[in-house]
Image (cartoon, helix red, strand yellow):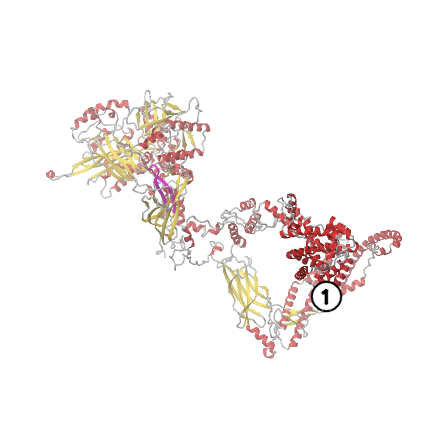
């Protein structure tokens, strides 16, 4: 566009130049742009030649030529237009470029032919040709001068240009030097014109002339200019051949010699400097900057950036684009598209939200290839029937039934219907008006207001009365003013009301009249409506008076009012007037001044007075005219009020009228009636958008009323959200149409059936109906007037009378969903669930937290995705809409409760599952819990419930002794609490519990640990010739079952079994079962020995012992050996059953069973009666006599893994018929060492197969955990203990070192705190006041009488708890530690030097003994048995000594040996004993945890006696039970004898009584063979006693005439320690 | 109704320990056993098994194929404690010591039909580098005290494991009376085509 316009300008300017020869400068300015230049020159090029050759046209040829040299630009521009004329003319003729070219070609053709043919110089013809063609060339030469232009040309053109340029110069020179043809030029021009533009040269001329005149280019010219351009370009660009031919022609014309040199110009290669190119590029190319665009550029001017996000609108996340890219884009957009539509209000590029999801939507592909097939498989899924559950209802648990909503639809009245006739319309209107009237009449507002007015007036009257008002004038005035304004208001209202009443009445009458006229007009009646106006007579006079009074009052009031008003107005007027006056004055002064000015500028007068007209002279208000006012009042009264004396009109609408029967009606009306009859109506009841029921279809009555009278009882599950009635109309047999929907309100919960009023709900329909009969239709205009004016459009409408109420249940309870579950409660809970699940989280219950989280995570509140969540949060945090009056932790829990809690708790199965999960002992191993409740027996729970019930009730029945029962309870409780405390710790695992891993070989440690050694091991032979013993593999106890575990008892040999005594020998020296005292004992053996040897001939069988092992009532026995030192070497295998089949570690640890190893003597009795048969048969009876037993608890076996050693056999103090053969052995000099010991011994090896991993690690772990509990010890002390223990363990890892223990409350206590002198019972001290040794023995016996109960048993193997001595005495149960501590404390109190020895013994394993220092030697006391041993006693069960504990220090044994035989007990030697408190760490004087003093109550003897009787009775019953097939006879005589004897035994503590006893017994039971023994044990429970009796096997005798004797004696010691003696015997009468 | 209702449901599983992928090891054998809850009891079949030693196949797959059959039937009253099969794979190390090459466990499939399971296997790691070395050297790698540990969640936090290899198992599962007891384990349970779902009054 631009260039063209420019050219036009140029053209026009050219003509100017022609005219005036001015404005060249301006032209230069315009021709600056390169492109424009080119185009200017295009046309200009041609004429140049012309000018130079044409003196006729150019006025001054000379300067022109100069111009061409010096300023070619200006020249061309000037000249161009001259040559132009022909072209525009051509173009104006309407020729297209094509035709132009065509013509040119023709011209060329002509020129060529002419040039070829003519020898003569035909100047006119070729010249124009030349004019044209060189024109082209010159143009190009000029281009050549402009290097910028050349770039756009082709190479060929370049050539031609260069050639032509040379030529041009030549030709110019030639022209200059010799102008040969000046005269012929005009003619040439003419000729040219003649040839080329012969069509209409004239118009062209005329065209140009106006152009010259009109400097501003017209549109026409512009068009021309546009037209001009293309042809020229076309010529120039396309016709190269033309150019060439033209040059040829020219050359020919000029007669030049065309050497090659003339055409080829040698020029340096074009070079454009980088600078130039850069500049060029700068012009051509656009490189957007990458700098940030300032925001103001991106926004319209003076617009602040607006951040929508800040304003709270939702903006999605923008896609992530690098900043620089954005900048470049912005810069580009700014430059290329100046419009800012790409930029948003915030100055950033408009961007859609990031569409990339942050997580992959495709499921991760598994690496398995073969799986894809499976995934593509089509699965058949059965259609699942939707079972409607009451889940969405309102917790059905508490409500007896469903809720019920009663909807009573009584009927329907149409206020308009398409079938309404005109009369109906009026009737409906009338009815409506009448209704209105009735309503108004009922309210009677006018009357009310009148009364009020009256009252107010009275009040004002009284208020004005000065006599009565003594109050301050102000207030009265004020109140009066208020009254007055009130009166005014009321009066207005009353007037309005009265007027309305009147109007209504009038309208009613009018409608009625219309109706009447209509009836008359149509000559039939459709409706039974009839209006009667009843007149009520009034007292004319009174009425008139009242009327007048009223008017007067009003007038006076109004007057007053007006006066006030007037007053105010006057006031205003005066002020305004003053103002006006002042202004007027000023105005006048001004005017004067203006006067002169006005004369000068008369026209200004018009505008001037304008502002001054502002103030108009105020008009004084007129005083009110009373007459006028009265007139007004009266008029108004006449309008709105009943005239005085006029009768009161009371309209009464009745249906008394008769409807014209069909026969008398016109056809259209009949048709209408028929139509109405065909119609019927029914209603659908829609509840929560679901149709629940519908009414019967009822025909539409002639009065357009439908009566349904139906009540629908909706049994609802869901909370009602909407209740809708749909009105359907059926016409004839055609389809039904939905007329309208009626929305019923959900009733309040207080509205119940019976109390609900019938309500009318209006409805209307928008259907359009036109009918071809008298019916007016619906939605269609109709008119009452004959001329069709005053049109009405009525839509179908009506009223449904209905009532909705909640039903009442049978018992009078309304069936209403509870309030809490209404709308908000329940449904919002549902919504809540959705909201939370929408963010993919479940179980979020704390909404405050949720809100916080939402705030923290910058959740966009406007993101539609988050909308429900946000709503939820806002609801939850603001609490506006719903604040529950309760607090619930699991808000959503209710959703998932499929049964109520009570029901769930009632379920036995659920209860069983719960209890099992809680690991309640009774149910811990309950297997296969039945699938149904009914299969679970009620008695499953009975034990458990009983236990729960009895927890605090002391049950004496089981325990006989109330105190023991109490203790047992207490123990049970302590146990439970401890178990609970450690329950968590039990589930705490260590690596070693789970993973078996070789320990890193420790280079420093002794034994096999060294890496080098183990390397050697690798080189070892796989099967060495002398295989070493390998440790058995240990088995964890988890995957075991009954029968997997066996207890192996290897019975090797026994020593010193008592031997039978011949019945004949009456007096024998008794042997003591246990050695009393070494000194005392030293002399005894020798004294008695001779008697024995005399009785037994050598070789006679002294005893035939065998061993019977019983465990868990399984009995195995060895073969019978002979002699008092038998060797069996037999292995017995006993199966082991864990309690409840639970083989877990904790369960195994708490197994209380003992292994009884009983030694019996097998005695053969000859039962043969007849000596004669002796030769032919053997008739003997085997009897077995119990000799003694060894009892080893299973827990010991379990923890020790194996028990290997020689044990002392527990032989009863009195063994009738047996005696020890000790003396004989000594005499023989058999074994001097062994002879030192009293009693019998048995060598055993006991183990379990497979070996079980004992729960040691659990124990250690517990103690770790325990330490963390709490300790009142000093932190430093605890650290020291740890250090001490670590040091000790490093040196002697197998020696027991104890520094801290756990007390019964779980606290860690330093061990020395347990040791403190404590007083033994006074009774014991008084027993032998002169013999300290005897006292010590007595005390030891007392301690040993306290029952032994291992901690592992009582605390299920959890930990080792140390109770203090008073606790121990209260509990009357404890293990070695408690016994040892008590004994040690007693010894300390007796003034002995005593220590606690921690070590290991047989069979207990790690245990505690007591060491005392007598004058010269040490004694080792077993606190559980009461026995004591000398340090060098080989039969001392204590096998190793770990540490000694005194009241103020701990000494760890650092001697090489730990056997008490080989160590030195002198703790003062630091090389032998490492003491805890030393010079480095001084003893801080720790206080004791023991009580100051022990208090002993004397035991109730009566209770003991009672217990004794009961035990005896129970045991007798038991023995009878054990002999189910035999008669059990009790020998009373013997029993009483035994009973007398038992106290003696107690008194003598089982010593030195046998002979007396025996003598006595023999005396009494002379002809009985007697075998029996007393059992002695501490009393804890009944069960151990029974077990002990059972294990003796006394009941096993099945000799027919056997008799039994059983006696029990209980000796009470202080603190309820009971010593129990049971004497059990069997008697066989000798024949 | 009460008389007809079953009191237990049965789960019968047969299939096989098909093969394993242990890229680094060869000559392996595997053991399997089942871990199940208290309400479960095996009624038929072997609860434990130990396979032959297999060598790697010579093809590219280098699979260790055992095709060791599993055939066991459980009965239960409660889906809690659904049986898991525990696999442990052993093989010789460079010194010829038998060491563990992997432990793994997976629940038996719930729904009847044919199921293929691939279990990643893992072994416990040594607690220290030194121990790792010595255990490698001595051929006494850390092992679980009981392979059944891998079927439990309790106490696992104290262990560290390294995964190595996969074992592929094939199960064919048949259930009986699960639907009758109210457990719907999947679409392919064809039982109860005509039978209605248990009435709501039925005890759980």
Question: In the current view of this chain or complex, which residue is farthest to the bottom?
Answer: A663
- In the picture provided, is A889 more to the left or to the right than A1426? right
Quadrant of the drawing holding the C terminus of chain A? top left
Give SS at disc 1: loop
Locate residue A1101: give its quadrant: top left
- In the picture provided, is A545 more to the left or to the right than A420? right
Tell me if residue A364 comes above or below residue B195 in the rendering. Answer: above
Q: Position of residue A112 (x, y in %)?
A: 67, 59
Q: Is residue A478 visible?
A: yes
Quadrant of the drawing holding the N terminus of chain A? bottom right
Q: Nearer the viewer, residue A612 or A326?
A: A326
Can you identify the residue that label 1 sits on? Answer: A641
Q: Is residue A206 magenta?
A: no
Locate residue A772: give its quadrant: bottom right
Tell me if residue A684 comes above or below residue A1354 in the rendering. Answer: below
Q: Which residues are magenta?
A: B84-106
Q: Nearer the viewer, residue A117 or A191?
A: A117
């Amino acid at each position: 566009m631009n260039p063209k316009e420019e050219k036009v300008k140029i053209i026009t300017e050219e003509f100017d130049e022609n005219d005036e020869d001015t404005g060249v400068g301006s032209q230069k300015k315009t021709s600056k742009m390169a492109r424009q230049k080119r185009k200017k020159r295009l046309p200009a090029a041609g004429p140049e030649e012309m000018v130079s050759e044409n003196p006729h046209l150019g006025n001054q040829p000379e300067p022109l030529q100069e111009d061409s040299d010096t300023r070619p630009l200006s020249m061309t521009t000037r000249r161009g237009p001259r040559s132009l004329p022909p072209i525009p003319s051509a173009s104006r003729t309407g020729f297209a470029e094509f035709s132009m070219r065509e013509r040119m070609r023709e011209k060329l053709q002509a020129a060529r032919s002419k040039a070829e043919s003519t020898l003569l110089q035909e100047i006119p013809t070729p010249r124009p040709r030349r004019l044209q063609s060189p024109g082209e060339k010159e143009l190009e030469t000029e281009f050549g001068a402009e290097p910028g232009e050349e770039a756009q040309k082709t190479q060929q053109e370049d050539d031609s240009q260069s050639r032509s340029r040379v030529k041009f110069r030549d030709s110019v020179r030639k022209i200059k030097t010799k102008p040969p043809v000046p005269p012929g030029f005009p003619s040439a021009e003419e000729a040219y014109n003649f040839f080329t533009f012969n069509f209409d040269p004239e118009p062209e001329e005329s065209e140009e002339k106006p152009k010259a005149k009109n400097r501003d280019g017209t549109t026409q010219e512009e068009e021309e200019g546009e037209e001009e351009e293309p042809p020229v370009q076309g010529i120039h660009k396309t016709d190269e051949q033309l150019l060439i031919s033209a040059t040829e022609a020219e050359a020919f014309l000029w007669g030049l010699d065309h050497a090659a040199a003339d055409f080829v110009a040698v020029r340096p290669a074009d070079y454009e400097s980088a600078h130039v190119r850069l500049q060029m590029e700068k012009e051509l190319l656009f490189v957007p900057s990458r700098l940030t665009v300032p925001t103001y550029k991106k926004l319209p001017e003076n617009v602040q950036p607006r951040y929508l996000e800040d304003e709270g609108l939702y903006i999605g996340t923008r896609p992530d684009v690098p900043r620089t890219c954005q900048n470049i884009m912005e810069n580009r957009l700014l430059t290329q598209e100046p419009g800012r539509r790409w930029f948003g209000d915030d100055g950033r590029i408009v961007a859609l939200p990031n569409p990339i999801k942050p997580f992959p939507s495709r499921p991760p592909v598994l690496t398995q290839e073969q799986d894809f097939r499976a995934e593509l498989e089509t699965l058949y899924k059965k259609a699942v029937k939707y079972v409607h559950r009451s889940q969405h209802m309102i917790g059905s648990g508490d409500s007896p039934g469903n809720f019920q909503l009663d909807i009573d639809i009584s009927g329907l009245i149409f206020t308009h219907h398409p079938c309404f006739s005109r009369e109906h319309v009026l009737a409906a209107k009338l009815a409506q008006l009448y209704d209105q009237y009735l309503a108004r009449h009922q309210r009677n507002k006018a009357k009310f207001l009148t009364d009020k007015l009256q009252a107010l007036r009275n009040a004002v009257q009284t208020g004005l009365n000065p006599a009565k008002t003594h109050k301050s004038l102000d207030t009265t005035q004020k109140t009066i003013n208020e009254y007055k304004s009130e009166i005014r208001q009321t009066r207005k209202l009353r007037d309005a009301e009265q007027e309305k009443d009147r109007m209504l009445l009038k309208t009613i009458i009018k409608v009625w009249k219309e109706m009447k006229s209509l009836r008359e007009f149509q000559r039939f009646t459709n409706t039974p409506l009839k209006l009667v106006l009843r007149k009520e007579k009034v007292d004319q006079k009174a009425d008139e008076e009242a009327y007048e009074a009223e008017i007067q009052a009003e007038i006076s009031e109004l007057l007053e009012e007006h006066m006030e008003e007037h007053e105010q107005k006057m006031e205003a007027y005066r002020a305004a007037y003053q103002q006006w006056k002042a202004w007027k004055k000023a105005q006048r002064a001004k005017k004067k001044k203006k006067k002169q000015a006005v004369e000068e500028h008369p026209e200004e007068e018009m505008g001037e007075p304008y502002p001054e007209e502002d103030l108009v002279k105020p008009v004084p208000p007129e005083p009110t005219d009373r007459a006028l006012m009265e007139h007004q009042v009266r008029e108004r009264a006449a309008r709105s009020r009943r005239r005085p004396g006029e009768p009161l009109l009371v309209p009464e609408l009745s249906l008394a009228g008769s409807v014209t029967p069909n026969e008398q009606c016109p056809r259209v009306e009949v048709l209408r009636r028929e139509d109405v009859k065909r119609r019927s109506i029914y209603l659908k009841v829609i509840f929560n958008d679901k149709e629940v029921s519908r009414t019967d279809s009822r025909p539409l009555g002639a009065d357009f009323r439908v009566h349904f009278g139906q009540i629908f009882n909706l049994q609802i599950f869901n909370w009602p959200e909407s209740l809708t009635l749909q009105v359907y109309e059926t016409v004839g047999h055609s389809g039904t149409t939905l007329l309208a929907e009626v929305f019923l309100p959900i009733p309040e919960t207080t509205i119940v059936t019976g109390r609900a009023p019938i309500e009318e709900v209006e409805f209307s329909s928008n259907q359009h109906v036109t009918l071809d009969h008298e019916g007016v239709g619906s939605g269609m205009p109709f008119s009452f007037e004959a001329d069709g004016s005053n049109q009405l459009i009525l839509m179908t409408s009506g009223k449904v009378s209905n009532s909705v109420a909640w039903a009442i249940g049978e018992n009078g309870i309304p069936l209403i969903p509870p309030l809490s579950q209404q709308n908000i409660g329940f449904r919002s809970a549902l919504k809540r669930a959705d909201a939370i699940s929408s963010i993919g989280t479940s179980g979020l219950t704390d909404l405050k937290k949720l809100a916080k989280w939402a705030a923290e995570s910058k959740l966009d509140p406007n993101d539609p995705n988050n909308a429900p969540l946000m709503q939820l949060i806002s609801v939850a945090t603001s609490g506006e809409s719903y604040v529950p009056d309760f607090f619930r932790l699991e808000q959503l829990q209710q959703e998932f409760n499929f049964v109520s809690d009570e029901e769930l708790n009632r379920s036995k199965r659920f209860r069983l599952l719960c209890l099992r999960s809680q690991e309640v002992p009774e149910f811990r191993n309950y297997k296969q819990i039945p699938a149904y409740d009914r299969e679970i027996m009620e008695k499953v729970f009975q034990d458990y419930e009983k236990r729960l019930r009895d927890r605090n009730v002391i049950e004496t029945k089981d325990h006989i002794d109330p105190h023991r029962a109490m203790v047992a309870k207490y123990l049970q409780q302590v146990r439970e609490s401890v178990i609970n405390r450690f329950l968590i710790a039990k589930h705490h695992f260590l690596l070693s519990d789970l993973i078996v891993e070789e320990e890193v070989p420790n280079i420093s440690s002794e034994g096999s640990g060294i890496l080098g050694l183990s390397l050697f091991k690798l080189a070892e032979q796989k099967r060495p010739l002398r295989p070493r013993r390998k440790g058995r593999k240990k088995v964890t106890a988890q995957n075991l079952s009954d029968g997997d575990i066996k207890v192996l008892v290897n019975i090797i040999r026994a020593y010193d079994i008592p031997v039978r005594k011949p019945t004949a020998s009456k007096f024998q020296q008794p042997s003591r079962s246990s050695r009393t005292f070494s000194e005392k004992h030293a002399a005894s053996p020798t004294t008695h020995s001779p008697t024995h040897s005399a009785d037994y001939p050598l070789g006679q069988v002294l005893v035939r012992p065998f061993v019977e092992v019983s465990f868990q009532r399984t009995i195995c026995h060895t073969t019978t050996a002979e002699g008092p030192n038998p060797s069996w070497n037999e292995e017995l295998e006993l199966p082991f059953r864990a309690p409840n089949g639970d083989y877990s570690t904790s369960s195994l640890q708490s197994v209380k069973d003992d292994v009884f190893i009983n030694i019996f003597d097998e005695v053969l009795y000859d039962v043969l009666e007849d000596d004669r048969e002796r030769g032919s048969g053997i008739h003997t009876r085997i009897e077995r006599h119990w000799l003694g037993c060894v009892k080893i608890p299973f827990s010991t076996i379990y923890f020790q893994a194996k028990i290997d050693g020689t044990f002392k056999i527990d032989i009863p103090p009195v063994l009738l018929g047996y005696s020890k053969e000790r003396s004989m052995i000594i005499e023989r000099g058999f074994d001097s060492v062994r002879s030192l010991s009293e009693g019998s011994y048995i060598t055993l090896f006991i183990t379990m197969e497979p070996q079980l991993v004992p729960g040691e690690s659990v124990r250690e772990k517990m103690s770790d955990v325990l330490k963390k509990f709490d300790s009142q010890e000093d932190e430093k002390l605890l650290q020291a203990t740890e250090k001490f223990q670590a040091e000790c363990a490093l040196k002697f890892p197998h020696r027991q070192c104890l520094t801290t223990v756990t007390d019964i409350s779980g606290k860690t206590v330093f061990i020395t705190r347990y040791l403190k002198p404590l007083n033994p019972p006074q009774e014991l001290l008084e027993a032998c006041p002169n013999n300290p040794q005897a006292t010590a023995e007595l005390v030891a016996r007392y301690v040993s009488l306290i029952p032994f109960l291992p901690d592992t048993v009582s605390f299920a193997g959890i930990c080792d708890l140390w109770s203090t001595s008073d606790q121990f005495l209260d509990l009357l149960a404890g293990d070695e530690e408690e016994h040892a501590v008590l004994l040690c404390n007693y010894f300390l109190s007796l003034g002995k030097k005593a220590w606690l020895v921690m070590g290991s013994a047989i069979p207990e394993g790690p245990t505690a003994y007591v060491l005392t220092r007598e004058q010269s030697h040490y004694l080792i006391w077993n606190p559980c048995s009461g026995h004591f041993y000398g340090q060098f006693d080989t039969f001392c069960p204590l096998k190793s000594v770990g540490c000694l504990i005194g009241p103020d220090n701990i000494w760890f044994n650092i001697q090489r040996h730990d056997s008490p035989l080989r160590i030195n007990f002198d703790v003062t030697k630091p090389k032998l004993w490492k003491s805890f408190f030393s010079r480095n760490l001084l003893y801080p004087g720790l206080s004791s945890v023991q009580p100051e003093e022990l208090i002993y109550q004397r035991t109730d003897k009566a209770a003991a006696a009672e217990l004794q009787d009961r035990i005896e009775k129970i045991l007798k019953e038991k023995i009878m039970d054990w002999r189910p097939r035999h008669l059990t006879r009790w020998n009373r005589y013997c029993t009483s004898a035994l009973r007398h004897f038992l106290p003696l035994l107690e008194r003598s503590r089982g010593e030195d009584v046998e002979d007396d006893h025996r003598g006595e017994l023999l005396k009494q039971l002379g002809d009985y063979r007697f075998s029996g023994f007393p059992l002695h044990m501490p009393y804890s429970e009944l069960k151990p006693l029974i077990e002990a009796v059972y294990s003796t096997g006394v009941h096993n005798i099945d000799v027919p005439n056997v008799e039994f004797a059983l006696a029990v004696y209980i000796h009470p010691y202080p603190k309820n320690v009971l010593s129990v003696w049971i004497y059990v015997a069997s008697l066989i009468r000798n024949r | 109704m009460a008389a007809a209702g079953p009191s237990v449901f049965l789960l019968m599983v047969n299939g096989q320990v098909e093969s394993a992928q242990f890229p680094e090891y060869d000559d392996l054998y595997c053991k399997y056993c089942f871990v199940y809850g208290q309400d479960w009891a095996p009624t038929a079949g072997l609860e434990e098994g130990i396979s032959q030693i297999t060598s790697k196949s010579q093809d590219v797959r280098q699979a260790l194929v055992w095709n060791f059959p599993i055939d066991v039937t459980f009965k239960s009253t409660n889906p809690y404690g659904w049986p898991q099969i525990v696999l442990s794979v052993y093989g010789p190390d460079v010194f010829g010591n038998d060491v563990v090459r992997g432990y793994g466990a997976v629940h038996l499939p719930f729904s009847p039909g044919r199921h293929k399971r691939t279990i990643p296997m893992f072994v416990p790691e040594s607690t220290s580098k030194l121990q790792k070395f010595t255990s490698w050297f001595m051929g006494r790698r850390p092992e679980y005290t009981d392979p059944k540990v891998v079927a439990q969640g309790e106490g696992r936090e104290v262990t560290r494991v390294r995964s190595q290899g996969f074992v592929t198992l094939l199960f064919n599962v048949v259930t009986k009376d699960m639907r009758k007891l109210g457990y719907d384990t999947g679409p392919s349970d064809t039982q109860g085509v005509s039978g209605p779902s248990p009435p709501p009054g039925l005890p759980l």
